[in-house]
Every structure is written in C-alpha cells, then in structure tokens.
Amino acid sequence: MQRILGWAALFALVGAQAHALMAPEYYRKARAEAPYHVQIDITKVEAPRTGAGTCAVEGQVLKIFKDATGKLAKDQIVGFTVACHRKGDKVPIGGTLWLDTDALEKADYMEVYLTDAAAGFDVALWNYKLIPKLSDTPQLPVD
C-alpha cells in the first residue's frame, strides 16, 4: 500500500509539473515571430496589492534589437502587462510564466519581446526577463 501511495504521489507531482509550462519551442517560436525585441528602463509598475494578477509596466526603450514595423524609437515610452505574484501567492497551473512582483518593483531594466495590441503592446507569450544592466547583445535571445 505504501508503494502504491508513493507512486501515486510521484505521478501527481510529475503531472502537475508537466502542465506547468509549455514546451520551450512554443516560447522560442513566439520570440522569433515577435515584431519587437527591446530592453527598457522600467519607469512605472502598477501591481495588485494582494494576490496573483496582472502588473502594468511602463518603460523607456533604450535598446532595440528588433523592430519589424519601424514603429519604435529610442527613448519612446512603451506599456504592457505581465503576470505577477508575490511570494506565497498561489498561481494557476498553466503556460503562464509568473514574475515575482517584488523583484519587478525593484528592477531597473527588462528585456522583452512585444507584439502589437489595440491599446499599445502585449508581451509575446510571456517572453520577458528582468536584467541587471543594459547590454549590446540580447540577454533573452531567440535561441
């Protein structure tokens, strides 16, 4: 009986982890297809007071790695949202990559892949990364 419970626990754990993220190629494909890839100076973060949710991020474009439309300009302010949570918050299982709200609020820079949206920009399939400093090469490359 103990062996059966052990296997059941193992399968439950593996199953939960298997559904936690999508396969890496989906995120990679979204990066490759995103029309914009930038590094920004984070200028504003609006986060939920409690619980997991959506953080609104604004930032000044400082590095442009890709701009397929010619829409972006250096020093332009861009805005988008990211999935965020505070330590201890429960987040739904799924393909969403959740960002620590406290880390976001303390961060100076972010590298992000963007797509066009009705109200500005969306993040391409949660492809963003907090970075300690600006760089001449991507810190979150396509491959």
Image (cartoon, grey):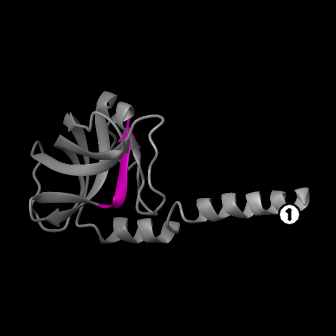
- Which one is in front, 58 or 4? 4
Question: Which residue sits furthest front?
Answer: 1
> Residue shown at 89%/56% (left/top)?
2
- Does residue 113 lie above or below 51 as drawn? below
- Which one is in front, 91 or 79? 91
Whether residue 53 is visible here, answered yes or no, is yes
Residue at which label 1 appears: 4
Whether residue 132 is visible here, answered yes or no, is no
- Does residue 85 lie above or below 72 as drawn? above
Q: Position of residue 45 (x, y in %)?
A: 22, 36
Crowd class of label 1 (few under 14; some 14 to 19; many from 20; radius 10 Å):
few
The N terminus sits in image quarter: bottom right
Report the amino acid beneath label 1: Ile
Please check the rendered image and state whether residue 106 is part of the magenta-colored stretch, yes or no: no
The magenta segment: 124-132
> Residue shown at 68%/57% (left/top)?
13
Q: Secondary structure at mark 1?
A: helix
Q: Main secondary structure of the magenta part?
A: strand
- Which one is in front, 9 or 104? 9
